[in-house]
Image (cartoon, grey):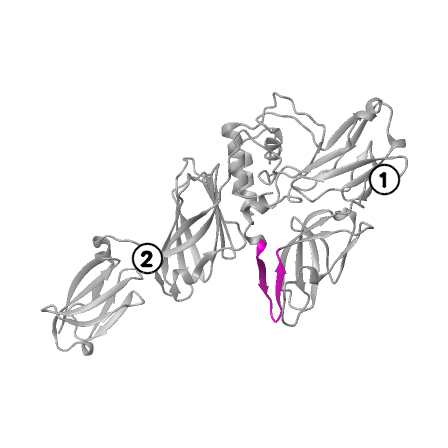
Amino acid sequence: MKKYLFLALIMMSSTFSIGQTCVTVCNSFINFSLDQNGEGFITPDMIDEGSWGDCDLQVELLSNGVSIMGPADTLFIDCSFQGTFDLSLVDAISGSACWGQILIEDVQGFCNDDVGPGNLPLAITGQNTSWITTDIDLNGNLLESVHQFLYAIPEANILSGENVINFPATPGNVGLGIISTLDLVEIMKIFEFGTNNPMRAIMADIDDSGYLGINDLVILREFILAIIANIPAENTLYVNENYVFDPNFDPFDFDVNFREFTFNSDTLSNVSFNFDAYSYGDISSIDSISSNTETEVRSGSEKMIIDEQSMEQGQIYSININLESDIDLIAAQTGIHLKDLKVVEIEHNYSSIEFMHTLVDGELKVSYVPTTINEQLSFTLIVEAEQNGVTSDFISLSDEFEQQVVNYENHNDINLVFQSPSFTKEELLEQFHLAPNPTYDVLFITLPESQNVQMDILSADGLLIKRMTPNTNSVMISKEDLPTSGMYFIQLDVDGNRITKKFVIL
């Protein structure tokens, strides 16, 4: 599963969230087996990893972000709750919460497919979704749900000749798993290389047009960035285990309906009622689906470099952001949290298709798919500082958006690196100002934007009078700081460059 590919390291760690007085600490992954009756109870102590403070702990079970049960002191589950779910530990007093995952299994095998006499079992296996609808009907008659993944087909309701089982659709935002730029690249693979598994193309048909097109890429990116809350296609596809695709299947022109299953009573003994459930978009999470371009997927880390500079409240600044990748970049997504910065404008040189972004409540999300492979990501934020400080005080990577740089063989994380901008001597001189010059009393000095500035004040004959390492780009010296009136020099060492200007005290 993709979740395990991306979170392999995280799964062994704990997740923290601090409330008012209670601090919740969760186990990131737990296994749970139903008992001999196919039942069980989930309690807070099963996921609690040492929460402290004034806590009133409850648990909540979720599937793909949708609450299924709780929060409550105890959750009762049975055979209908098999699979992997999100499990949240919630402090009822402060609302503080942490989260992990729980794998619920029937290890002892007591959840069988017994649907009673006179019935046939219809079983569903979630491939990349644990959201399974319950409103399944045979010839217009609703089937009884034994549990979430098992239904009873009354043999008396099977008509002579043709019969139809209908699987209702769910809204386009329900049941979607973790979708990211990795899925975009999987779709781009199909465009370039084709696929030997038609389900990849069908799961990528986000607009439900009956063919794979550029519009699917655009819509999927909008969904990733939360520009749209729903995909056009109604979700969840049910594929019979014996379904065989046409060997001439065309990913760019197909007509299939996986919410309707037709069978004939004359061949009932040869019919399987076992179905696999798929969710749109989350292609890369399906381990069983292969492509013509199977490769070893490697992970690593890339640098996103941001200029470190001093910032004063109320002033406008340009912040250059450059993603330097060592791989042949095909797509990237990044989320940046902006604190005490008001974004005036976002400047870039890309088309609206290549560079897409959203900015909500200080959370900037960017999706980047260049038309030229290995084109590095670079853009500039024009911001107004709402507090005094340096860039790294105000900018961090978002915890709410997965950071990815992706190509066909790699999916790398992103690290944030702050560094002083590099300038030529000519550029440094343009930023280095003395005023008024000459002066009778006070000299105001504007220094280049850098965190590595050493400033020396020298006499006319080159003797060192004073040495400073300013932590701001605005410095003031007065006549009282110098031994006598006369001519002096200010010499700057900036990131290995040395520049000098003279001034006169009258």
Q: Is residue 19 left or right of residue 422?
A: right
Q: Secondary structure at mark 2?
A: loop
Q: Is residue 13 magenta?
A: yes
Whether tag 1 and tag 2 are in contact, CB under 8 A, the answer is no
Q: Position of residue 317 (x, y in %)?
A: 36, 57
- Compared to residue 193, the image places residue 453 above or below, namely below
Residue 426 horizontal side relative to residue 238, left or right:
left
On-image quarter of the C terminus: bottom left
Foreground: disc 1 or disc 2: 1
Label 1 belongs to which residue? 115
Quadrant that contains the N terminus: top right
The answer to whether residue 42 is visible is: yes
Q: Which residues are magenta?
A: 12-28
Measured along the vertical axis of the image, is residue 53 above or below residue 195? below
Residue drawn at 58 percent across, 63 percent down: 17
**CA separation in Å, label 1 and label 2:** 69 Å
What kind of residue is marked 2?
Ser
| Label 1 packing within 10 angstroms: few (<14), some (14-19), many (20+) | some
For this orientation, the residue located farthest to the left is: 461
Q: Nearer the viewer, residue 314 or 136?
A: 136
Q: Which residue is mark 2?
A: 420
